[in-house]
Amino acid sequence: MIRLALFASGSGSNVENIYNYFSNNTNFIISKVYCNNANAGVLERCKRLNLKSLVFKRHEFFESSLVLKDLIETSDVIVLAGFLWKIPENIIQVFSDKIINIHPALLPKYGGKGMYGMNVHKAVKENNDAETGITIHFVNEKYDDGAIIFQAKTSLKPSDGIEEIAQKVHELEYKYYPKIIEQTFS
Ligand code: GAR
């Protein structure tokens, strides 16, 4: 049984999708949802889905081993699902090759600090790109820099607004992220 720690900062629609995908799979279990934002929508989902959660503050994450100690007890793999802080080195060292992220664009385009969520889709729109997509990759100590595991593309129409772009990307995320998690860690 592989125990997945899910990290999220926002609405958590990917958390719910991953939860649903693995709900009938006895090889994987969601151990806990880790969240840096006490007001995040993902915490409502956790209550509804009966998922354990841990909310932590910046100093607890970056200047203590509180989260690392908890992870060592609860989890084998870390899945970032809309998590916006960089993962500190103490966690990367202990969970090397066991941390996976989804980025809402085709890296190396639109990666790096500040490039998350709607900021990415705004930049894609401003550049009039004809396509965008998702990148699933291992996590290292730099933003959006670890080895790429999988990418998928979607085409864009000039009339697509930022919301439409976000929706197309979310569809790819829901379709592929759970499957790639399963394949990568089976
Ligand atoms: C997702 O689109 C995910 O790719 C993105 O945040 C969104 C979270 O949505 N992640 C990043 O931008 C990481 N750099 P959700 O809370 O509804 O799952």
Image (cartoon, rainbow, N blue to C red):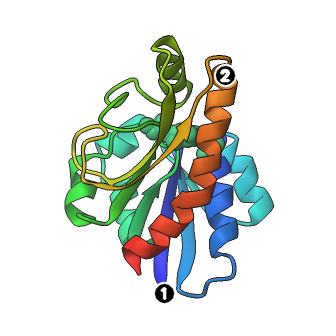
Image location (x, y in percent) of residue 38: 62, 39
Secondary element under disc 1, as helix, strand or loop, is: loop
- The structure residue drawn at horizontal position 65% and vertical position 66%, both measured from the top left corner, is 19
Mark 1 / mark 2, whichever is N-terminal: 1
Disc 1 residue crowd, few under 14, some 14–19, many 20+, Cα 10 Å: few
Image quadrant, ligand 1:
top right
Residue type indicated by callout 2: Asp
- 52 left or right of 72? right
Of residue 40 and residue 166, the one placed in the foreground of this image is: 166
Of residue 31 and residue 105, the one placed in the foreground of this image is: 105
- 94 left or right of 166? left
Can you identify the residue that label 2 sits on? 160
Quarter of the image containing the C terminus? bottom left
User: Is the residue 120 above or below the residue 67 in the image?
Assistant: above
Query: Of circles 1 and 2, which is in front?
Result: 2
Q: Do we see residue 36 in this rendering?
A: no
Disc 2 residue crowd, few under 14, some 14–19, many 20+, Cα 10 Å: some
- Mark on residue 137? none
User: Is the residue 4 above or below the residue 66 in the image?
Assistant: below
Disc 1 and disc 2: Cα gap in Å?
42 Å
User: Is the residue 38 above or below the residue 99 in the image?
Assistant: above
- The structure residue drawn at horizontal position 62% and vertical position 32%, both measured from the top left corner, is 166
- The structure residue drawn at horizontal position 58% and vertical position 49%, both measured from the top left corner, is 172
Q: Quadrant of residue 10?
A: top right
Secondary element under disc 2, as helix, strand or loop, is: loop
Image location (x, y in percent) of residue 18: 61, 63
